[in-house]
Structure formats: C-alpha cells, structure tokens
Image (cartoon, helix red, strand yellow):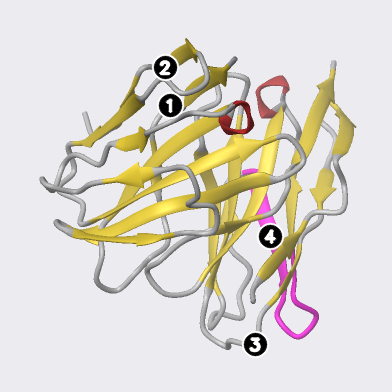
Amino acid sequence: EAQVTQNPRYLITVTGKKLTVTCSQNMNHEYMSWYRQDPGLGLRQIYYSMNVEVTDKGDVPEGYKVSRKEKRNFPLILESPSPNQTSLYFCASSSSGQFTGELFFGEGSRLTVL
Amino acid sequence: AQTVTQSQPEMSVQEAETVTLSCTYDTSESDYYLFWYKQPPSRQMILVIRQEAYKQQNATENRFSVNFQKAAKSFSLKISDSQLGDAAMYFCAYRRGANKLIFGTGTLLAVQP
C-alpha cells in the first residue's frame, strides 16, 4: 500500500529536549515536505526537499532542521523545542517532473511542548 | 506573494442538501493548480478535487464540483447531496511549480441529519 508514515503520532515533551519526527514514504517520490497546522492559520510549510541531499526552507523554518540522506526518509528535527512549536505536523510527498499537484500526506504528528 | 483566502470559518448544511465553500486567491501567474483537500476528524488530508488553471472546464468528482473563475481568482467547492461523512475541515490550496502548496485557513463543515 502506497503511504507516507510518520512517527510518533503523539508526543508530549519539555522545553529544550531534542526530538525527531520521522517520515518515510514507499512511493519512490523525489519531493518531500513538512507542514505544521495551527488553528486559524491553515497549513504552513516548514522545509521541503526536491531530492536526496537537496533541502530548502519553507515559510516557517525557524527552530527546525531536516535532512534527506535517503530518498524515502525525511526526518524533522527540533533541536531545542519551545512551547510555540506545539502543533500538528504533517509530512507529505509527491513525484517531481511535470507537477500534477497532488501531495500525499502522512497521518500527522501531534506535538505538545511543555 | 501568493495567498489563499477562505472567508467562511464554519459552514453548516442539512443532509442531502447542497453547500458551497468559498475560496479566493491572489497570484500574478497564469499557469498554476488549485485544490480542495478534506480533513476529517481522523486528521488525514484527503485530496477532493484538482483544477488546472489553463483548463476552462470546471472539474467534477462525483458529488463534488468547482466553480473556477480565473479572472476573479475564485475557486469555490460545491458539495451536492451532502452526506454525514462529508463533515470535515476543508482546505483550499494553490500550487505553482514544484516547491509547495499554499493553503487557506480552512472551513469547518458540519452536516446536520
């Protein structure tokens, strides 16, 4: 089954404790991206990657890091989480080339930073 | 910069009735894509319908159709014969190029039995 898998689905942590949210896709997609969803703000892009070893900032990259060492994986790293990073996070992927638009989303990761 | 506006934070519809969700966007580009995504309580983002800007014909997917007005930069979603399973948050989104989707703030749709 074609899917984007995120882990953990739920996480409560404390300020300053480094954490990683993993994302893996099995569709051989070149493009992967991270979004955060906040009430009243919709989804905003954090980082994206056009292919292995190619990453770039989205609209709200502060406080986050990413890496793309393998095509299927695109982890999101919070080096020193703060309460304003409490949010619902989505990983998404799509094939590149002539872009048809559809992003395939993971099921979301609910993060709470105390 | 491109922006997407959904002016209806919440909407309600009776089961079997028709409802229209509004979306406007701002862009100076002529070639782009527009989407409606559905997010049910499970939080999964599900693509409902897609429209290519160069196509004048409005996209349709079963009970879902759009009214795409390119000159007015308007992209509304019509849901016909509403069902209880249509209750969800609906996001309008814009994309040009490979980098990202730009989302609106969402419309929460309630379906009354």
Tell whether label 2 touches label 4 (CB within 8 Å): no
Q: Name the residue under label 4.
A: B66
Position of A105 compared to A1: left or right? right
Relative height, residue B41 to residue A61 (above, below) = above
Task: Where is residue A96? Give x, y as percent.
Answer: 26, 65
What is the magenta range? Answer: B63-75
Q: Do labels 3 and 4 share a chain?
A: yes
Q: Which of marks 3 and 4 is in front?
A: 3
Mark yes or no: residue B15 visible.
no
Mark yes or no: residue B72 visible.
yes
Give the secondary structure at mark 4: strand
The chain carrying label 1 is A
Tell whether label 1 touches label 2 (CB within 8 Å): yes
Tell whether label 1 touches label 3 (CB within 8 Å): no
Q: Which of marks 1 and 4 is in front?
A: 1
- The residue drawn where x is 56% and y is 18% is A112
Within 10 Å of disc 1 (Cα), the crowding (few <14, some 14-19, many 20+) is: many
Q: Name the residue under label 3.
A: B28
On-image quarter of the N terminus of chain B = bottom right
Q: Name the residue under label 1.
A: A107
Amino acid marked by disc 1? Glu
Amino acid marked by disc 4? Val
Pick whichever of labels 3 and 4 is earlier in the sequence. Answer: 3
Relative height, residue B35 to residue A69 (above, below) = below
Q: Do labels 1 and 4 share a chain?
A: no
